[in-house]
Image (cartoon, helix red, strand yellow):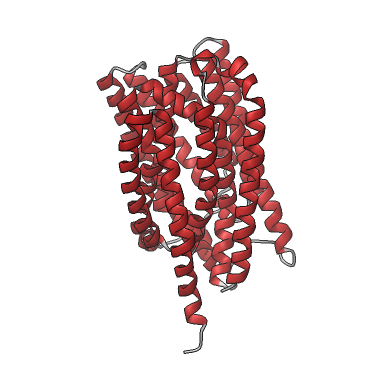
Amino acid sequence: MAAPRLSAPGRPGRRLLLDSFASLLDQGVLSALNLVLGLVLIRLTAKESYGLYAQLYVAGIFTTTLLDALVTGPLTTLAPGLDDARRRALVGHLDRYQRQLAAGLAVVSGAVAGGVVAWLELPAHPVALGAAFAVYVWAGSLREFGRSVGFVEGHARAVLRMDAWYAVAVTVSIGLLAALDWMSLPAVMLALGLSNLAALSLRPLDGDRDAAGFAEAVAAVWQRSKWALPGSLVAWFTNYSYLYLAALWLGVSASADLNASRLLLMPLSLCVLAWSRVARPHAAKLIKAGEMRSLDRYALWSVAGIEVLTLVYAGTLWAILPWLETHVLGPRYAGLEPLLAAWTVYFAIYGARWIGTSLLTSGDRYRMLLISGVMCLVVMLAATAYAVPRWGVWGAVAALALVEALDLALIWLVLLPSARRDALRPLRPS
């Protein structure tokens, strides 16, 4: 039986375009939701509470990163090469595997969050926050797996429906909290967790859970995840540990300033993620077919599109920034212009770098990514230790931009050409 099609017969370009548009629209909905939620919390909660929310949000990204490395990343690499029956069996096995991992991560995450809040005497009830965060991590992990499977199987429009329902649930629940004046951090995290559960009824998951071979499926995934896991952890520390380091050196309010300025540009990051959801399965298919020229064109057009989007979005944001500072952010977050300029440079580099990283992931190059990730982590820690004590929060963003620039050069000038040569070598006559 032939490998499953990732695009409609006879019209692959149109199907890819529709899926890409649906993915972009999906991520646009989530970007708008994240932006509005952040602005609401900035407006209605204390600066320290928003700083703590920012750190919990990043901790949630950490759990997503773990599960992507252990489950969904390898699934994206393996699925395009399987026939329909084997793919459904793999999805069913990994759904069970991911549920087990998500439950364990939720318990650990809740205990750690509650313990840290109690130890540092942060502005939240430790038990309530720990329980709410555990629900948030567990439910969010299940929804994220469903999203990943939907994109792998070419069901981007089904993912959009699920995430639209999630957005409605978040809007209603947060609106209710605001109306009742219950905008505490545990209540917000619980509302987000329950909204994830509400969306799970529309999860696009078509797996065969009755097939035998669970251990074999986990073993096949582990062959990739044993390299992807350390690489993903290193990448997370490189991209997000600045928030905790800044809080350690400068206080929790510094985390609030960093996240508030980054929040305004986060839709750019989420648009890059939307691209990767559709692009990774498509790139894996092109690599398996040996269509490297098509892959090169796709990558270059993707980079061009992301950079144009970055310029247009950043220009629009700068135009409306005075209004945002007056009517939304308020005086507690005045003077964010230097941070926004630094974040704009960072995201312009980040978009091109992430596209290169996604191509390496599609080509099963996890060891390459681990090596580059370790190098970047070392540079980030050194740059942050130097820049933050001297230049404060601006130094943290400058250190991140430096690391992204180095990683961009390494991936596009060294790692991708090497991977391309390896992919073409079997096609050459011996």
Residue visible at 43% across and 38% down? Answer: 398
Nearest the viewer among 214 and 58 is: 58
Nearer to me, 204 or 339: 339
Residue 424 vertical position relative to residue 339 in the rendered view, above or below: below
x, y percent for residue 3? 58, 69
Q: Quick check: 176 left or right of 112?
A: right
Q: Is residue 150 above or below residue 213?
A: above
Q: Position of residue 192 (x, y in %)?
A: 50, 28
Q: Look at the image and tell me whether residue 155 can be seen.
A: yes
**Side of 351 relative to 422 (left or right):** right
Task: Examine the rendered structure and indicate whether residue 174 appears above or below residue 303.
Answer: above
Q: Could one spot residue 209 in this view of the protein?
A: no
Q: Residue pushed farthest left?
A: 119
Residue furthest to the bottom in view is 430
Residue at the farthest front position: 390
Residue 222 drawn at (x, y percent): 36, 59
User: Which corner quadrant holds the N terminus?
Assistant: bottom right
What's the residue at 61%, 15% (across, down)?
A: 326
Residue at left offset 31%, top offset 42%: 381
Q: Position of residue 421 (x, y in %)?
A: 48, 74
Choose between 296 and 36: the one closer to the eye: 296
Q: Quadrant of residue 162?
A: top right
Nearer the observer, 189 or 339: 339
Task: Judge left or right: residue 199 versus residue 232.
Answer: right
Q: Quadrant of residue 325?
A: top right
Q: Is residue 361 left or right of residue 175?
A: left
The mark total stands at 0
Residue plotted at (56% across, 51% down):
277
